Image (cartoon, rainbow, N blue to C red):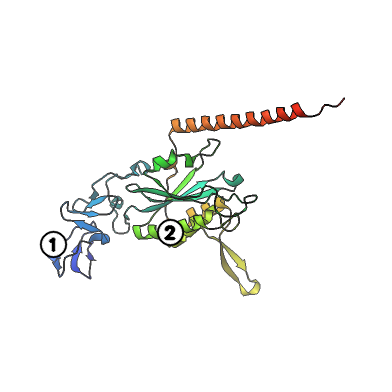
Amino acid sequence: MLRAINSMQKRGFSTSFGVTIKERTFAAQHTRYQFNGKEYDSETETSDFGARNLDGDLGIWGARDPLADKYSDFSPYSYVNNMPIWAKDPDGKDIIILSAPKGAGGFGHAAVLIGNDKDGWRLYSKNGTNAGIGSSGASNKHPESGVKFNTLSDFANSNTNFTEEGEIQYKSAFRIATDKETDVKMAEAAKEAVGSYYNVVCNSCIDVVSDALEAGGLDPGYSTEQVSLGVDGHIESKTLNPVPNIRYKEIVKNNEGTDVSKSIIPNKDVAAQKKKEGTDKKNIEAGKKLEKIKQREQFRPKTD
């Protein structure tokens, strides 16, 4: 299959893998941006997709897919699994939606990682408020806005991925392929959402996720239902469920992406150490409470 490329600046044709057919090429003006709008590197004769460079002559990447372990059935060097007619590979800029199902008393907690495996990831997480009973107030409970992790493994083994008790926090991760421009929009929306007023019902952690997705033109996790109008028929109603666990499932259902939960599983030794630290902390706290009880008993007036 032949496809016209760069019609505004270069009247040429390419194969599905981006190789220019020289006999049919006549350039009115040179342009570096060619196949799929990616920059062509004349020195290496490859197209720069950001995370990796594509060799159009061979139809393969010049580097191994960083997620190859998740797609063992495919070659780690093949471009879009050798299906360039209908599939595409973005420049490696993605968003990963994180779910901590046990958070908030079982209602769940959610956050997002925005970035790629080459340049690193930035975490955006709204973690509540210290005001009153914690249901609403300023977003000031250790908010995480753009916290940098070089790799997903770094995130998986970080304190962020563990509760104070040493339990692994995030159990599920859903990765959606985007592009650099979209990532910028999503990061801005996520940052604004993290810093905005916290409300457990209408402006919580899951709304950081939804705001980022919506800014990127993706589905924020709408639940759809048919509302009856009686004899007049029915209409389709879309709502955003305030429960993080429920909305996370809708996000996964409504968007094209990949389950990358295995990528955020921490190292066993790290997990064991965090668990021990959590247990030790719990025992220390229990000891302090017991000591206070003993002190109260010691000074309590005795009655006959």
List the single residue furthest toward the top: 304
Q: Residue at x 61, y 66 (%)?
A: 227
Tell me if mark 1 has few (under 14), some (14-19) or many (20+) residues whose alpha carbon lies within 10 angstroms of its own: few
Instruction: Say above or below: 2 vs 209.
Output: below
List the single residue furthest toward the right: 304
Number of numbered discs on residues: 2
Q: On the rendered structure, is 23 left or right of 219? A: left
Task: Return the x and y of residue 88 as percentages of the image width and height.
Answer: 32, 56
Nearer the observer: mark 1 or 2; the answer is 2
Name the amino acid, label 2: Glu
Q: Residue at x 14, y 66 (%)?
A: 24
Name the amino acid, label 1: Lys
Q: Secondary structure at mark 2?
A: helix
Q: On the rendered structure, is 74 left or right of 138? A: left
Mark 2 sits on what residue?
188
Check the picture and name the quadrant holding the C terminus.
Answer: top right
Closer to the camera, 254 or 10? 10
Task: Return the x and y of residue 177 as percentages of the image width and height.
Answer: 38, 54
Check the picture and name the quadrant holding the N terminus.
Answer: bottom left
The quadrant where residue 73 appears: top left
Tell me if mark 2 has few (under 14), some (14-19) or many (20+) residues whose alpha carbon lies within 10 angstroms of its own: some
The quadrant where residue 20 appears: bottom left
Q: Secondary structure at mark 1?
A: helix
Please report whichever mark, 1 or 2, sits nearer to the chain's N-terminal start: 1
Mark 1 and mark 2: span between their CA atoms? 43 Å
Say the numbered circle drawn on residue 36: none
Closer to the camera, 205 or 251? 205
Closer to the camera, 214 or 174? 214
Task: Return the x and y of residue 234 as percentages of the image width and height.
Answer: 60, 70
Say the numbered circle drawn on residue 22: 1
Instruction: Say above or below: 86 vs 149.
Output: below
